[in-house]
Amino acid sequence: MLKLEVRTEPSRVWNYGSPLLALLITVLIGTLMFMALGKDPLKGLSMFFWLPLHNAYAVGELMVKATPLLIIALGLAVCFRSNVWNIGAEGQYIIGAIFAGGVALMAGADTSRWIVLPVLLAGVLGGMVWAGLTALLRDRFHANEILVSLMLVYVAVQVLSYLVGGPWKDPMGFNFPQSKTFEAVTRIPRLFEGSRVSIGALLALLSVAGLWVFLFRTRAGLALQVGGLAPAAARYAGFSSRKALWTALLMSGGAAGLAGALEVAGPIGQLTPYVPAGYGFAAIIVAFVGRLHPVGMVFSSILMSMFYIGGELAQSRLGLTNSLTGVFQGLLLFNLLACDTLVNYRLKWSK
């Protein structure tokens, strides 16, 4: 029979092969799921893995979805590498969108085009403020950052609902809970004519390079990672665990807030109750599938975006529920957790 045997050291092959195996198992389970629903599995899988890539416009839409996922995941990777469990990036994303929306609502038609920069900076500030609450409660009162950050998501949702249904409600919006549409000068510039891809995609790629340098080429990045892997060694080396906590959460919150600003000042163009799109939670999967490495998260964010678009296509063309997006995301995460066993254990046949 097969049994698990502990490896003498973690397998480098399975460290990178595990996400690929998890994806393969997810595809196999997805095939069975489409068959059980009475749908053509090839047609169903094409919604997730082919149509999001089949032409230039589809690739552009894929980049629109991948941009916020990648930016949020980069911030979460800093936290997770520091052993700080920020699960509330969705709330930081929402507050960043609110801060950015507040600045955008103050702009007029004759405002300078440079208002885009304060809009983005406001989003970063909003995310940092919301993450700072978690850091404060963890630092001063030893509260669990998992619970605090997660519960603050629901507070952020209520703040957004209050604003779009009250003080910031569009008086010409036919009583819908939404703000007025932002002025054109506040909208994020697009990269290509006829495409919704904005400069946010470039910011995401620059963030990938910046995070790689920070994590692997700076003393501050080393201090964060050592503090996460070996707190005792970090204290011996003179690294401050308190500083690492604040740095990780503020960087993560700022990244999530930036993603929120790019969304409301980009594809959405106003504040609505539908700003929360689950990107903050999906980015957790993106971070771990990408192995908390900046380059790996580029590919995992694209994969997760394919799940989002595939779910929308399956709903419109196959008559299936849009919750298939969450099903594929959950399958990928659980399969990854299962396959990660092979990193530290090997399967061995014994009589």
Image (spheres, grey):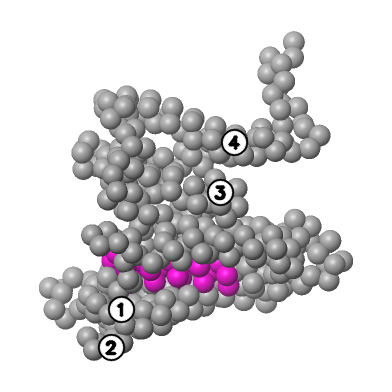
Q: CA distance from mark 4 to mark 2?
A: 51 Å
Q: Eyeballing the image, is 50 above or below 146?
A: above
Q: Which residue is mark 4?
A: 18
Quarter of the image with the N terminus in it: top right
Q: The disc labelled 4 sits on which kind of residue?
A: Ser
Q: Main secondary structure of the magenta part?
A: helix
Quarter of the image with the C terminus in it: top right
Q: Which residue is mark 2?
A: 111
* Residue 296, numbered circle: 3
Residue 332, how many percent across, how many down? 48, 39
Mark 1 or 4, which is nearer the eye?
A: 1
Q: Eyeballing the image, is 142 above or below 50?
A: below
Label 1 Cα crowd, 10 Å radius (few <14 / some 14-19 / many 20+): many
Write down the region rendered in magenta: 250-268
Quarter where residue 144 is shown: bottom right
Among the two numbered marks 1 and 4 on one chain, the one whose residue lies closer to the N terminus: 4
Q: CA distance from mark 4 to mark 3?
A: 13 Å
Q: CA distance from mark 2 to mark 3?
A: 40 Å
